[in-house]
Amino acid sequence: MAQITSGLRAVLSAPAVYDLFENLVGAARCRSVLVREFARPAGGERVLDVGCGTAAILAHLPDVDYCGYDISARYIDAARTRYGGRGRFVAALLTEASLADERPFDLVLAVGLLHHLDDDEVRQLLRLCRAALARHGRLVTLDPCFDHSQSAIARWIVAHDRGQNVRTLDAYRQLALEVFPDTRASLRNDLLRIPYTHAICECRG
């Protein structure tokens, strides 16, 4: 089983395969709900997407000033090919230096990112996100989640995610509260075609 999981992770590093897999499990609907019900961006807002992958969320955003960061050059190349005229795409790790010349953002997205990071790395990222935000800006995160109410199948799928730091809803919330005193956390079991549990945090300073 470990070899199968490792092989799937390697295959998903290819942008085309990753996008195909996302489409098969219904990720487009997940992104649509995330944008419509939680992020709620307005046209013209500045949006920073941390760990943007192939930037597929752009298909669900209005006309915004978009900037996507991802450490995978392959994902960023795919994003530029598909959405080149709709934003800036940076193949790099987001750092304080990255933000030095940026104007504040109205919205920061971290979709499927926190569960790849340990607690200290999450804290560091959240501080960067807060520094990137305008005074009344907000951060929206989405990650797989463990919950006592989820089905055995959902728990198994979540446990075999590529990220090694899947948490409970309360664990995500508590980490966010350390940096964003106004944090609302939501649990969703209905965003994909497969049994799956998501934690969504809406954070404001």
Image (cartoon, helix red, strand yellow):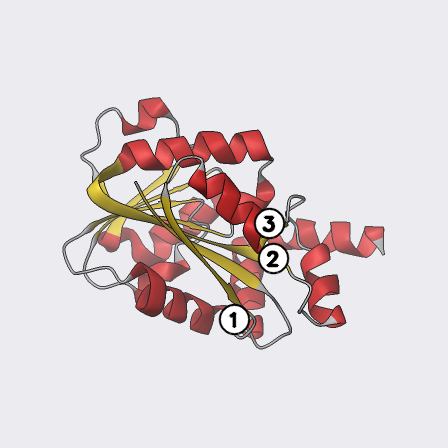
* Mark 2, residue position: 145
* Mark 1, residue position: 23
- Residue type indicated by callout 2: Cys
Task: Find the distance from the CA under tag 1 to the CA under tag 2.
Answer: 20 Å
Residue drawn where x is 58% and y is 61% of the image? 17
Closer mark to the observer between disc 2 and disc 3 = 2
Answer left or right for 16 relative to 167. left
Q: Are marks 1 and 3 in contact (CB under 8 Å)?
A: no
Answer left or right for 127 relative to 205. right
Residue drawn where x is 32% and y is 69% of the image? 36
Closer mark to the observer between disc 1 and disc 2 = 2
Q: Which x, y percent locates residue 8?
A: 71, 56
Callout count: 3
Residue drawn where x is 37% and y is 40% of the image? 180
Placement of 109 over or under 118, stated as above or below: below
Task: Find the distance from the CA under tag 2 to the CA under tag 3.
Answer: 22 Å
